[in-house]
Amino acid sequence: LSERDPFRQGEVLFQMAEVHRQIQIQLEEMLKSFHNELLTELEKKVELDARYLNVSLVIDI
């Protein structure tokens, strides 16, 4: 990279920004997938556990 070639430096900076943008998009997609696959299942299990505990309390009374 030559200090005398600002166009080339600008081009490299643009490419770096584009790669950063693509990485951010991939990260967001991975986090959405993580939430949908794992956290949604955990939320369902917690809800089922709460129902079970409520039924158990009613039966014990």
Image: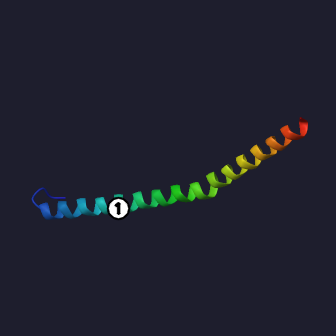
Please give left or right for residue 40 compared with residue 28 in the image.
Answer: right
Percent position of residue 53, x then y: 80, 41
Amino acid tagged 1? Val
Please report the residue visible at 89 percent of the width from the left and 35 percent of the height from the top.
61
Percent position of residue 31, x then y: 52, 55
The quadrant in which residue 60 appears is: top right
The quadrant in which residue 10 appears is: bottom left
Please give left or right for residue 4 compared with residue 42 in the image.
Answer: left
53 over 45 or under it: above or below:
above
Please report the residue visible at 62 percent of the width from the left and 58 percent of the height from the top.
37
Please report the residue visible at 31 percent of the width from the left and 63 percent of the height from the top.
18
Percent position of residue 36, x then y: 59, 58
Closer to the camera in the image, 44 or 10:
44
The quadrant in which residue 57 appears is: top right
Please give left or right for residue 14 compared with residue 5 in the image.
Answer: right
Instruction: Give the quarter of the figure containing the N terminus.
Output: bottom left
Percent position of residue 39, x then y: 62, 51
The single residue placed furthest to the top in the displayed view is 61
Instruction: Identify residue for label 1.
Output: 19
Closer to the camera in the image, 39 or 44:
44
Characterize the local packing of mark 1: few (<14), some (14-19) or many (20 or more) Cα atoms within 10 angstroms: few
The single residue placed furthest to the left in the displayed view is 4
Please report the residue visible at 25 percent of the width from the left and 62 percent of the height from the top.
14
How many numbered marks have been drawn onto this rendered protein structure? 1
Q: Which type of secondary structure does the marked residue at label 1 adopt?
A: helix
